[in-house]
Image: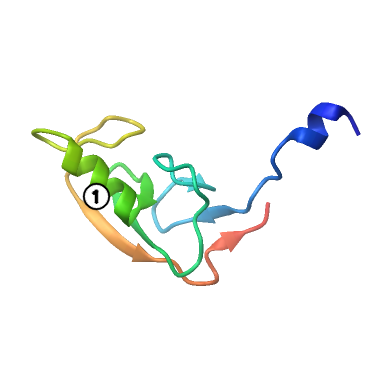
Amino acid sequence: MSAASKERRPESPRSTVWGAASYSECAICLQAYEPGKALKLLSCSHAYHRKCIDLWHCAQPGSKTCPLCLRSVTAVVLIHLGAHYCEQE
């Protein structure tokens, strides 16, 4: 095993959220999604921790956008993750 591969962070399981792309962590706080936590799924299909996206949108004047794709947010769905949300690749 090379030194670079030993130093890399182990890959965490990716979450598959209804209608969303597959991500292992919140793009705002960079913490892994965990069972039992609430996520918000935006109209662009990007999901974030509920508290993270709420703070992001509170800091934005005017219309709200997605931190990743910068599209205007037209709808938000609150999703509570159960223990079954993770999939091993």
* SS category of the residue bearing label 1: helix
Of residue 58 and residue 72, the one placed in the foreground of this image is 58
Is 32 situated above or below 2?
below
Question: Quadrant of residue 51 in the image?
Answer: bottom left
Q: Identify which residue is drawn at 19% across, 37% down.
A: 59
Q: Is residue 82 left or right of residue 6?
A: left
| x and y percentages locating residue 38 in the rendered image | 37, 63
- Residue 37 relative to residue 56: left or right: right
Pick out the residue farthest to the right: 1
| Residue 25 in picture, x, y percent from top left | 50, 47
Looking at the rendered structure, the kind of residue marked 1 is: Asp
In the image, residue 30 above or below residue 78: above
Is 66 displayed left or right of 17 in the figure?
A: left
Residue underneath mark 1: 54
Residue located at (39% from left, 40% from top): 28
Residue at 33% across, 48% down: 52
Q: How is the image coloured?
A: rainbow
Q: Residue at x 54, y 72 (%)?
A: 83
Q: Is residue 41 above or below residue 5?
A: below
Q: Quadrant of residue 44?
A: top left
Residue 36 is situated, as x and y percent measured from the top left of the image, at 45, 70
Query: For the N terminus, which image quadrant?
Result: top right
Number of residues whose C-alpha sits closer than 10 Å to that of mark 1, classed few (under 14), some (14–19) or many (20 or more): few
Q: Give how far across and how far down residue 32 sits, in percent.
A: 52, 51
Total numbered labels? 1
